[in-house]
Amino acid sequence: MPFGPGHNLSQMAAALPDGHPWKGKLNALDKHSPAATRFRYPSPVGRLSDPPGADRLEADLHELGALLAEARQRLAPHLQA
């Protein structure tokens, strides 16, 4: 499925057909969409957001790592080395 560059995971999920096994997984990750810009660009009042704490980063890395492992497992039969 062609999809251009972007940061909004819910838009990517919306492009999937209803019932697609990854649609709910991508929607659940939409909480990470703002992170693409939140810590790099100032808000309209000129402030940068505080970075996430170590506990939050560890939980996020665990969640994303599990999803990547599942993707590798599902896609491995279709990939040529």
Image: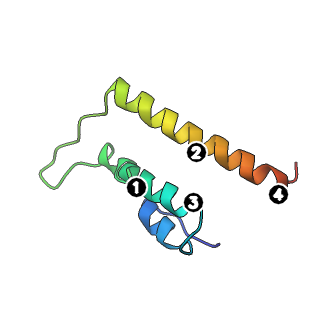
- The single residue placed furthest to the front in the displayed view is 19
Contact between labelled residues 1 and 3, with CB atoms less than 8 Å apart: no
Tell me if residue 31 comes above or below residue 55 in the rendering: below
- Element on which disc 4 rests: helix
Residue assigned mark 1: 30
Residue 25 position, x and y percent, is 51, 55
Tag 4: amino acid: His
Question: How far from the left and from the top, in percent, is residue 67?
Answer: 58, 45
**Secondary structure of the residue carrying numbered label 3:** loop
Task: Please report whichever mark, 3 or 4, sits nearer to the chain's N-terminal start.
Answer: 3
Which one is nearer the viewer's eye here, 48 or 57?
57
Q: CA distance from mark 4 to mark 2?
A: 17 Å
Residue visible at 31% across and 27% down in the picture: 53
Q: What is the quadrant of residue 48 in the picture?
A: top left
Secondary structure beneath disc 1? helix
Residue occupying the point 71% across, 46% down: 72
Mark 3 and mark 4: Cα distance apart in space: 17 Å
Q: Element at badge 2?
A: helix
Residue at image mark 3: 22
Task: Give the quarter of the figure containing the N terminus.
Answer: bottom right
Residue 58 in picture, x, y percent from top left: 44, 28
Q: Amino acid at mark 3?
A: Trp
Q: How far separated are the C-alphas under marks 2 and 1?
A: 13 Å
Q: Nearer the viewer, residue 27 or 21?
A: 21
Q: Of marks 2 and 1, which one's residue comes earlier in the chain?
A: 1
Label 4 close to label 2 by CB (< 8 Å): no
Counting residues from the N terminus, which is met first, the one under dot 3 or under dot 1?
A: 3
Residue 78: which disc? 4
| Left or right position of 7 against 39 | right
Q: Is residue 81 left or right of residue 34?
A: right
